[in-house]
Image (cartoon, rainbow, N blue to C red):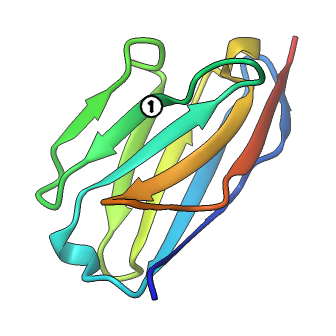
């Protein structure tokens, strides 16, 4: 059974930082690509960042230069380092691989 468990969401002030984690089990972690998505209230879910099994990364325009996605294949964990957070980053953040989603973790950025 594939499981993705996100953690690290919190309430933070604008300009602050957070690191989200996604612990993965039930799948060949090293062989797979992973992504972070987010969904703000009343908005569609959007892609934040992806990382391939070789470590190649892609970022959404709204987070380029501020967020970093990286992975630890030994720990089977994907991370999202979020710097210089803005109120518009407020959303539930989800980890995804193939057709599998985590339950999400709430990030709230106050102005």
Per the image, the residue denoted by label 1 is 48
Residue 83 sits above or below residue 8 on the image: above
Using the image as rendered, state which of residue 12 and residue 41 is in the foreground. 41
For this view, does 43 lie left or right of residue 110?
Answer: left
Using the image as rendered, state which of residue 34 and residue 109 is in the foreground. 34
For this view, does 8 lie left or right of residue 102?
Answer: right
Q: How many marks?
A: 1
Residue 85 sits above or below residue 17 on the image: above
The residue at 47%/13% (across/down) is: 62
User: What kind of element bears circle 1?
Assistant: strand
Q: x, y (%) of residue 101? A: 51, 59
For this view, does 37 lie left or right of residue 26?
Answer: right
Q: x, y (%) of residue 75? A: 41, 81
Q: x, y (%) of residue 2? A: 44, 81
Furthest residue in direction left, as rendered = 54
Using the image as rendered, state which of residue 73 and residue 90 is in the foreground. 90
Picture quarter with the C terminus:
top right
Residue 57 sits above or below residue 55 on the image: above
The residue at 66%/18% (across/down) is: 43
User: Is the residue marked by circle 1 packed among few (<14), some (14-19), or many (20+) residues within 10 Å?
Assistant: many
Using the image as rendered, state which of residue 109 and residue 25 is in the foreground. 25
The residue at 57%/60% (across/down) is: 21
Q: Quadrant of residue 27?
A: bottom left
Residue 28 sits above or below residue 94 on the image: below
């Amino acid at each position: 059974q594939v499981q993705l468990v996100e953690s690290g969401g919190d309430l933070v002030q604008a300009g602050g930082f957070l690191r989200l984690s996604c612990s993965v089990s039930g799948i060949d972690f090293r062989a797979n690509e992973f992504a972070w998505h987010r969904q703000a209230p009343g908005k569609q879910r959007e892609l934040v960042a992806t990382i391939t099994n070789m470590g190649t990364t892609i970022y959404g325009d709204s987070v380029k230069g501020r967020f970093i996605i990286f992975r630890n294949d030994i720990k089977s964990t994907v991370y999202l380092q979020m710097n210089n957070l803005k109120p518009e980053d407020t959303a539930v953040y989800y980890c995804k691989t193939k057709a599998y989603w985590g339950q999400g973790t709430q990030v709230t950025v106050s102005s």
